[in-house]
Amino acid sequence: MKINSPLEAYKFLPATNCGECGEATCMAFAAHLIDRSHKLTDCKPILEAKFKKKYEELDALLAPEIREVEIGVGDKIAKIGGDDVLYRHKLTFFNQTQFAYDVSDTMDEKDLVERVNYIQDFKKFYVGNFLTVDMIAVRCTSGDPAKFAAAVKKVMETTDLPLILCSFDPAVLKAGLEVSKDRNPLLYAANKDNWKEVGELALEYDVPVTLFAPDDLDMLKTLAKTFAEMGTEKLVLDPGTFPTGKQLKQTFTNFIKVRRAGIDGDREIAYPIMAVPFTAWMAHDDPVSASYWETVVASVFTIKYGDIMILHSTEPYAMLPELHIRDTIYTDPRKPVTVDPGMYKVGEPTADSPVLVTTNFALTYYTVESDIASNKIDCFLWAIDTDGIGVEAAVAGGQLTAEKIKKGIEDSGFDMKKDTTHNTIVIPGLSARLQGDVEDATGCNVMVGPADSGRIPGWMEKNWPPQKK
């Protein structure tokens, strides 16, 4: 049976509290085993021969219900699968959906290189991180193994992103593998007609492979069982992605059935799932409609339960919704998204610049910072440690108090009386009730700013600099 609590994992550890894993106690290490920030092999004592049985038992109990598959090599390696739950609020989803955008071997070389560069360079800053895409899917549309191999080689020369080699022709896949075998690409795909030849390629080159059985879950399971008996479990399942009408509903149902079976213990089908929103381009002649429905399908199967996707549309209006919903779904619901507490400079503040207070909830901090920076307001911005809770909730719950504001300023090493000419702190409008307490705790003048950071520019025009008392 799968274990999901630190206490259950702790029972198997040597309990020496040796600290070799980097944690002060074995219980702390057990907690990190559950959230996967540490590996069991980080515990040196359990690797000793006398603990072999406990190691093997715990290793099996910690293994995810859905097998984890790796694509690519080095720093850009893509990990898919590895989940334990159907609903992320029960634990979390670990390896985020990998987005692969396509190129074809019939593209002009210049256009191919430009598209690959666009894909690998695309990024959007959001709540402290850059949202990026992950992989390149090289499609064989020529039917020519040599031409496909040349396209794969050119893509490899242009990027180190992981690759998907797309063809149902084993000869084409073999040609692509000959030039990319050291990059551990994913083969797409084996089906009921080519499974033997593609399976032999996957074994010979030791690479992951996608199994494709559109709207036929019995065939999909049969293929998975066959490949496992052949000797590989580096498998990705594609139950088919139908982008319109009743078939889209059936696709949705198939994804849920496959994932539920895997989570419930059917090891024969407990593999990552591939969605192919790209099929929207086969169903719609109009590029705008195709791009729209591709984005819809990608969003649906980011939630339920696509571990990897092949897409085509690279317009920002298509990519940004896909990236944002992925970031939302794969944010750990157990941990608020935070920034490090401390004093930050926005622009080039001087001793005359305002001192603004906010919380270290990342969405709050970056919203305030963006509103200030975009209006070219030079200021000091304090992110007070509120355990990653927003202003209104932190005030109500006691995570944002006068003492915490005082401590946050002191810990930053900033002296309000020496480092400013005004000795004034501006607190958020939603924390107005703290004004008097903050004045008493810090000895500073305290002004109440607007409740909405978007109104800071207008508030500054009317209220800054403060009137001398």
Image: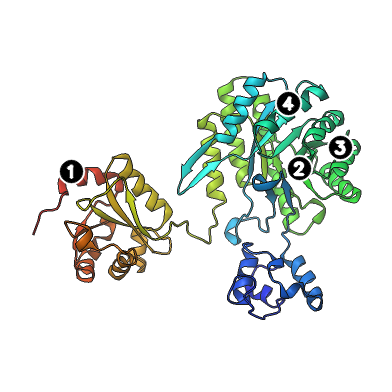
User: Of discs 2 and 3, which sits in the foreground?
Assistant: 2
Lower position in the chain sequence, tag 2 or tag 4: 4
Image position, residue 211 (x, y; %): 80, 40
Separation of marks 4 and 1 at Cα, in angstroms: 58 Å
Lower position in the chain sequence, tag 2 or tag 3: 2
| In this view, 396 is above or below 464 | below
Nearer to the camera, 16 or 271: 16
Q: Mark 2 highlights which residue?
A: 184
User: Of discs 4 and 1, which sits in the foreground?
Assistant: 4
Quarter of the figure that contains the C terminus: bottom left
Q: Mark 1 highlights which residue?
A: 461
Disc sitting over residue 151 in the figure: 4
Q: Amino acid at mark 2?
A: Asn
Lower position in the chain sequence, tag 2 or tag 1: 2
Q: How many marks?
A: 4
Lower position in the chain sequence, tag 4 or tag 3: 4
Disc sitting over residue 198 in the figure: 3
Nearer to the camera, 121 or 142: 121
Q: Amino acid at mark 3?
A: Val
The structure residue drawn at horizontal position 83% and vertical position 45%, both measured from the top left corner, is 206
Q: Is residue 290 left or right of residue 43?
A: left
Cβ atoms at labels 4 and 3 below 8 Å apart = no
Quarter of the figure with residue 278: top right
Local crowd size for mark 2, using a 10 Å CA cut-off: few (<14), some (14–19), many (≥20) = many
